[in-house]
Amino acid sequence: MAELGNPKNTIEILQKYDFRFQKKFGQNFLIDPRVLEKIVSAAQITKDDVVLEIGPGIGTMTQYLCESAGQVAAVEIDRNLIPILEDTLSAYDNVRIINEDILKTDLAALSQEYGGKAFKVVANLPYYITTPILMSLLEGHVPVKNITVMVQKEVADRMQIGPGRKDYGALSLGVQYYCEPYIVANVPPNCFMPRPKVGSAVIRLTLYEKPPVAVKDEKLMFTLIRASFNQRRKTLANGLYNSQELPYAKEEIAEAIAAAGLDAGVRGEALTLAQFAALADAFTERRG
Ligand code: SAM
């Protein structure tokens, strides 16, 4: 039984081990069984799946995952949590606890240990590193089927919006190139211990087999995207010209913008993913 979903049991465990929350690790533990059930059900986990959990904390969600998945690999950075996890997960023989920083974990090697099977990733993410974790999962070419995560509400919103909105940016385009986002639920601060200062949301990202737009040079497209949003207030042409990462002369930029069918004075924040792809292709074609 996943008994940690009950807040009383969570408090008991924290007291038993005299656990001190570490702010620097973004520790806000989930204490609402309805939210835990919602996350696990949105992740569409079956006994066939290998689940990668990022930041298991005291193992609350891990217990639910162990019950629904074939195998669970749980990567936790805080070594003070390891003896607690060994205790709370002692009833399950399908879980492996890995005491590492997820950003330094070799996930390709880890997936090989499970026969190269694509992971379903589930996490109540540490908010201080949401974007690097997600982008490394998406760009890292690690086999992943879907990613169901708790994030700050405004970050979840940013992942699914299009041009013309204030928060539209590199994260929106990065996420939408690789996957289809779906907001599962909004989650208020009182579902966590301690309570975060911001609202949260669960979002599921289902990875595309093939991106929704075709582009010849994916890396160049993302460099163009970053350059455009680094200088939001400038025109696209100026943003690209001022970027240290791009080698293009003013005339070359003007030609590529025209070749992509865009107005000379357009701002980067107005471009859709398909338009950034067309722009990247225009540069690639010009340079051969
Ligand atoms: N999953 C637990 C829950 O829902 O109650 C805990 C979630 S808490 C928001 C984030 C967890 O991620 C903490 O346990 C924290 O120690 C861990 N964490 C923070 N940074 C990490 C990193 N770089 N690699 C792995 N785990 C990390």
Image: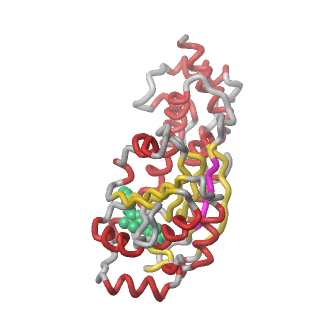
Q: Is residue 251 above or below residue 25?
A: above
Count of numbered circles on the image: 0
Q: In this rendered view, identify the residue nearer to me: 182 or 239.
A: 182
Q: Is residue 26 visible?
A: no
Per the rendered image, the range of residues in magenta is 201-206
Does residue 245 show up magenta in the picture?
Answer: no
Which residue sits at x=62%, y=72%?
A: 37
Q: In this rendered view, identify the residue nearer to me: 268 or 19.
A: 19
Which residue sits at x=33%, y=60%?
A: 77
Ligand 1 - quadrant of the structure image: bottom left
For residue 235, side relative to residue 55 (left or right): right
- Counting from the top left corner in percent of width and height, residue 31 is at 51, 79
Give the position of the C terminus as an image quadrant.
top right
Q: In this rendered view, identify the residue nearer to me: 240 or 74.
A: 74
Mainly helix, strand or loop, the magenta region?
strand
Which residue sits at x=41%, y=46%?
A: 110
**Rendered image quadrant of residue 40:** bottom right
Which residue sits at x=43%, y=63%?
A: 126
In this figure, which colouring scheme has been used for the structure? secondary structure
**Rendered image quadrant of residue 157:** bottom right
For residue 62, side relative to residue 26 (left or right): right
Q: Is residue 53 above or below residue 190?
A: above
Q: In this rendered view, identify the residue nearer to me: 28 or 252.
A: 28
Does residue 205 show up magenta in the picture?
Answer: yes
- Counting from the top left corner in percent of width and height, residue 47 is at 60, 58
**Rendered image quadrant of residue 118:** top right
